[in-house]
Amino acid sequence: MQKQDIISEWFRLYSNDIYNFLVYYRGSQDVYDLVQETFIKATRGLHNFRKQSKPKTWLISIARNVAIDHSRKEKRRPHTSPLTFSDREKYVTDHNPEDKLLENEAVEEIYGHIMSLRHNYRDVLILRGIQGMSIKESAEILNWTESKVKQTFYRARKALEKRLMKKGVLHYES
């Protein structure tokens, strides 16, 4: 199979996953451009793909690096404008409009708290908690050990939980 055929097939299979990852990782700014840049870099670096991981994992690691590079070029922190979930139409319920609005506001608030965490915590929460990546896939993308992924994910969840409780978003019932 030709290089272009492989990348075209991967684009068909994984472009939505890459897009969703970048939306969560970066916010809604320039995501289409970053998806395109991810696949351009994948085309150029296809000879480096070792087939030890899934293509999706390899592409998301490229997308993460593209987003980091883009943020460095702009000399600003990533995630400066949180994604509005209503724009993404990602959160769909069968409730009435008022309930849906309240749910969307709660999700946006939680997302804002995730974006305010340390980079390592954000990365692992997005990959494991939002994208549903396995420990192994997350470790490959982040270039961490699996135990570091487990430990950081646990700490990130605890840090997020603490913030949500402090802000009154999350309540424990006795």
Image (spheres, helix red, strand yellow):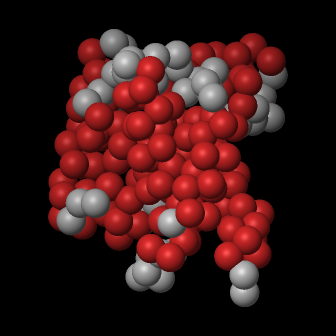
Decide if residue 94 is in sight here.
yes
Compared across the picture, whether 22 is left or right of 52 comes to right
| Rendering coords of residue 6 (x, y %) | 70, 75
Residue 29 image-quadrant placement: top right
Q: Nearer the viewer, residue 104 or 57?
A: 57
| Rendering coords of residue 55 (x, y %) | 55, 71
Residue 95 image-quadrant placement: top right
Residue furthest bottom in the image:
1
Q: Quadrant of the C terminus?
A: top left
Q: Nearer the viewer, residue 124 or 52?
A: 52
| Rendering coords of residue 78 (x, y %) | 42, 25
Residue at 53% from the left image edge and 20% from the top image edge: 82
Compared across the picture, whether 124 is left or right of 131 comes to left
Q: Nearer the viewer, residue 24 or 63?
A: 63
Compared across the picture, whether 42 is left or right of 138 comes to right
| Rendering coords of residue 50 (x, y %) | 43, 80
How many marks are shown on the rendered structure?
A: 0
Q: Quadrant of the N terminus?
A: bottom right
Decide if residue 129 is in sight here.
no
Residue at 47% from the left image edge and 38% from the top image edge: 67
3 in relation to 105, above or below: below
Residue at 80% from the left image edge and 18% from the top image edge: 97
140 in relation to 19, above or below: below
Residue at 37% from the left image edge and 19% from the top image edge: 75
Residue furthest front in the image:
44
